[in-house]
Image: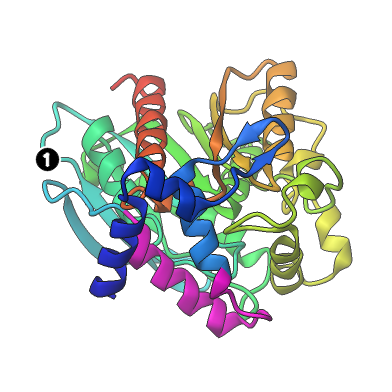
Amino acid sequence: MALQRRLLKAAVGLPGPARRRLAGEPLEIDGRRLDERMQILTRLATARAPRSFDVETMRRGEAELVALAAEDPRPDVAVHDRTIEGPAGPLPVRLYHPPAAVDRAPGIVWFHMGGWVIGSLATSHALCTRLAHRVGAVVMSVDYRLAPEHRFPAQLDDGLAAVSWMIANADALGVDPHRVAVGGGSAGGTLTAVVCQQRRRRDEPQPAAQILVYPLTDWRARGGSLDSCAACFPLGTGLVEWFRAQALPDEAAADDERASPGRSSELWGLAPAVVVTAGFDPLRDQGLAYARALEQAGVPVRVRCEDALPHAFTIFGGLVPEARRATERLVDDVADVLGA
């Protein structure tokens, strides 16, 4: 693995002319151009892509990709794993404590990406260390149950329990219970949006912010970027459909607002949102549509599309400088929203 990482770094670090030759003809979709180094990784990865999907292969592939491409975690953030009480028994979480905190720290509950099928605490590890350091927050990453072993709504049940646990245990964690945000990437962003909607329906206080990073908001969405970015790496439309088949118990579940938060017509009163999408992502249009719908409902929203990057760009910061810069912009947005 270490040798593969060095070889990939060497490939994306080639001088300009050699790098352009390796990247090939620039990839342009919907008036956007893919970052050159990201295009090199795309070419190398797609050449080795599996011909078909199965759960164990996909889980191994995701873990290997994160190990190869992610930034190193910050060494000055204290990290420890534990379990909390979940709806189906002990729920594994990973806590990140900032190097220094004045008074009560903000809190962030984070849900990793992976279509509710793949991913783990390792997926967002480097990002969570950066959130803890830059925001000065206590971050709790949640190892929620995965499909197909545990289909929807198991993920939502775990997500709601995790947010309630952090708020209830704010004193022991050194967290300000009024400054607890919720966030996640991709299907973790879906989970974030649904948690906020469900807490409002239950007359529970809203989080201080919701952080939606390239979120899936509607399993029924069609057209637009789902077509133009259908063959993008690392997420294409075929993989989106595969995740849906694994995660949802039946076709009708795709209409459930608890699975497709963008289908809700009642978005008023939700937490202020940070919505970050990616240009080369089949989910781009639905993330932007959800941001617009939140704005129309009177929710404060800051929205940005990282035009030159693909879905899951937060795990490519170890190899792609633009992905690292985009992740820094995301972390700065979160710090600003939480007043850090």
Residue 131 visible: yes
Image quarter of the N terminus? bottom left
**In which quarter of the view is residue 206 placed?**
top right
Does the segment drawn in magenta span residue 48? yes
**What's the amino acid at mark 1?**
Pro
In depth, the one of 258 and 70 nearer the eye is 70
Residue displayed at 73% across by 70% down: 242
Circle 1 residue: 99
9 horizontally vs 241: left or right = left
The residues colored magenta run 47-70
In depth, the one of 303 and 32 nearer the eye is 32
Image quarter of the C terminus? top left
**In which quarter of the view is residue 49 placed?**
bottom right
Residue displayed at 67% across by 27% down: 291
Q: Main secondary structure of the magenta part?
A: helix
**In which quarter of the view is residue 276 placed?**
top right
Residue 197: horizontal and vertical position, in percent? 66, 39
Residue displayed at 14% across by 32% down: 101
